[in-house]
Amino acid sequence: MGATIKAVTTREGTKPFAFSEAALAECRSIIARYPAERSKSALIPILHIAQSENDGWLSVNAMDAVAQVLGLKHIEVYEVASFYSMFNLHPVGTYHLEVCQTSPCMIRGSEKIVGHLSKKLGIQPGETTKDGMFTLKTVECLGSCGSAPMLQCGAKYYEDLTPEKVDAMLDAMRAENKRQTYTDR
Amino acid sequence: MGRKLLFEHITKPGIQGLEGYRANGGYRSVEKALKTMSPEAVVEEVKKSGLRGRGGAGFPTGMKWSFLAKPPGVPRHIVCNADESEPGTFKDRYLMERIPHLLVEGMITSGFALGAESGYIYIRGEYFYVHRILERAIAEAYAAGWLGKNILGSGFDFDLHMHIGAGAYICGEETALLESLEGKRGNPRIKPPFPAVKGLYDRPTVVNNVETIAAVVPIVNDGGEEYAKIGVGKSTGTKLISAGGNIKRPGVYEIELGITCDEFLNSDEYCGGIEGRALKAVVPGGSSVPIIPGELFLKTAAGETRLMTYESLSDGGFATGSMLGSGGFYAYNDAQCIVRSTWNHARFYHHESCGQCSPCREGTGWMEKLLHRIENGHGHMEDIDLLWDIQRRIEGNTICPLGDAAAWPVASAIRHFRDEFEYHVKYPTKVKDPDHFAKEPFKRELKASYA
Ligand SMILES: Cc1cc2nc3c(=O)[nH]c(=O)nc-3n(C[C@H](O)[C@H](O)[C@H](O)COP(=O)(O)O)c2cc1C
Ligand code: FES
């Protein structure tokens, strides 16, 4: 977000990145939604695909690949990726737990859920567990205020949370151990 | 039971799919408009209905549509604002998730009225699973000939596409939304020119909220006059209200505009009353509208019964009223701390400011810091006046209304709950416990002096 500028990292992400064939086909079908000379419109949807194909975060290599697909300058991609809060510019855990902390959730107990997660995982919001399994993050209103407190992980919403439900969720995630991304179907 | 225009069939089996939707009268508005009406006649019905934009500002939809520029040879667009990021608001998600074809139908009928070549539904990134539901609905509509070339043999061509965002409240502001749709950062544009003249790709564009576009369906089916029979004065038709906070029955309700606030809050058809404790305060229309004490929500300062309408909720201006806004309603019980909630609101706006305008970028950060300090027992009395001063200098001094939206929650909290801020300064040790009012509710001394 503008007011809290996220730095584009160059320290991480030396791993090469290439889109899969399936992803490239999806990119092409997204580009077709916009007028021919306006393919830059596809940037955000395609960044989502790149992020999902790069373990849930955007390395410089991944962003550069997006620039190549769309024929954009690298900076045009970085400046967009760094604006939107769903684009992670650093690696995240297999399960990226994003707990809503905005007022309507706060008055229904979101602070207690954040506290509980923090204690269970031994990390503060913004941190990742040593085993790389969980990243905890606090985020702003996710449009689920009537089922607060709640959190998002990948494409899924976990609503009406209680400490017991959180424990059950964490256990299920540890057992499953499969990366969740926003584009999951 | 109030009349339901959008949610009439929402619990019917199979309503998510095209077949179930058709079986319950779906796509009749497209048939009626394309086969029996001119585009101008559809605009006329929307004007007659008195429909006002459901995204927050309440601007008359028919009037907005009639401003659309129509230079020959230039394609026009209709864009649906499904960014829904105003805290407290979750009505559009509910509608899109449960009855996606209603939005698709509304887009086609509205697109016809505006002579649009194509439409885009800009949905917030966090709603990825809703985006999938709509993609499926759009594919079904294409397969059945409701979208594409020469729809129903009328000669009208219309394409509809989904567009996913990536987490930014500001992209709900219509010009930031258009920037984002063009693949850029969500920085609002300077107006004029308005989108009706220079919108998406510099072409004439109408941007409307999900609920506004859905409401076009019953308006075309039953006629604008019929729609306008519901409601009071300039608040016509039905409105979706998403209700949250400390109430017994959180959820999304379709109300007839004009029911009393008391009925909405306390009847079992809607919120079912406050959970456990006493009512303290209400935010009636999303976090950007002024917070008001419970008694001012139920009755105006003049002692009249307050109604769920645009006019009644703003009766008394900012001194004693609030706004219907987006319909993102949340109520506070007396265990809640207004200072903590105001700090939370300020943090939200600081995080979501796009950073273009100094008063908003810097001012929201200062407000957050000051409020954090007061809430945690490190504040000074002067901080309260300083806060007032900062919010006043943000309001009206920014490119887009996010600045106002950040200022109003702070201003209204100080206006109505100043003694609670002072309490935090006077008793720093008591407020160290985040649940400070849960054990012993704060007793307001300030009663009628609405500054
Ligand atoms: C900061 C900000 C955020 C907004 N967010 C939304 C939103 O999430 N959804 C929406 O429909 N309108 C939102 N609006 C209002 C839009 O700018 C615009 O007025 C609306 O989409 C017009 O549609 P309507 O006339 O149908 O309400 C927002 C405005 C501002 C200033
Ligand atoms: S405030 Fe948490 S989902 Fe809206």
Image (cartoon, helix red, strand yellow):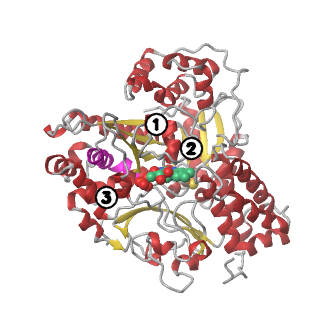
In-image side of B212 versus A172 (left or right): left
Where is residue B223 shown, x and y percent of the image?
Answer: 22, 62
Q: Does label 3 or label 1 sit earlier along the sequence? A: 3
Q: Relative to B422, is B334 on the left or the right?
A: left
Any part of residue B12 in sight? no
Question: Dot 3: what SS?
Answer: loop
Q: Is residue B107 magenta?
A: yes
* Magenta stretch, main secondary structure class: helix
First to last magenta residue range? B94-114
Along the line of sight, the residue nearer the viewer: B170 or B21: B170
- Residue B76 is one of the magenta-drawn residues: no
**Cα distance, mark 2 to mark 3?**
31 Å
User: Subunit of mark 2?
Assistant: B
Q: Name the residue nearer the viewer: B343 or B386.
A: B386
Q: Are marks 3 and 1 on the same chain?
A: yes
Query: Nearer the observer, disc 1 or disc 2?
Result: 2
B267 relative position to B184: left or right: left
Q: CA distance from mark 3 to mark 1?
A: 24 Å
Q: Position of residue B399 (x, y in %)?
A: 60, 49
Question: How many labels sit on residues?
Answer: 3
Residue under circle 1? B164
- In the displayed structure, B82 sits above or below B141; it is below
What residue is pinned by disc 2?
Answer: B188
- Name, please, the residue furthest toward the front: B72
Nearer-the-camera pick, B168 or A18: B168
> Dot 3 corresponds to which residue?
B6
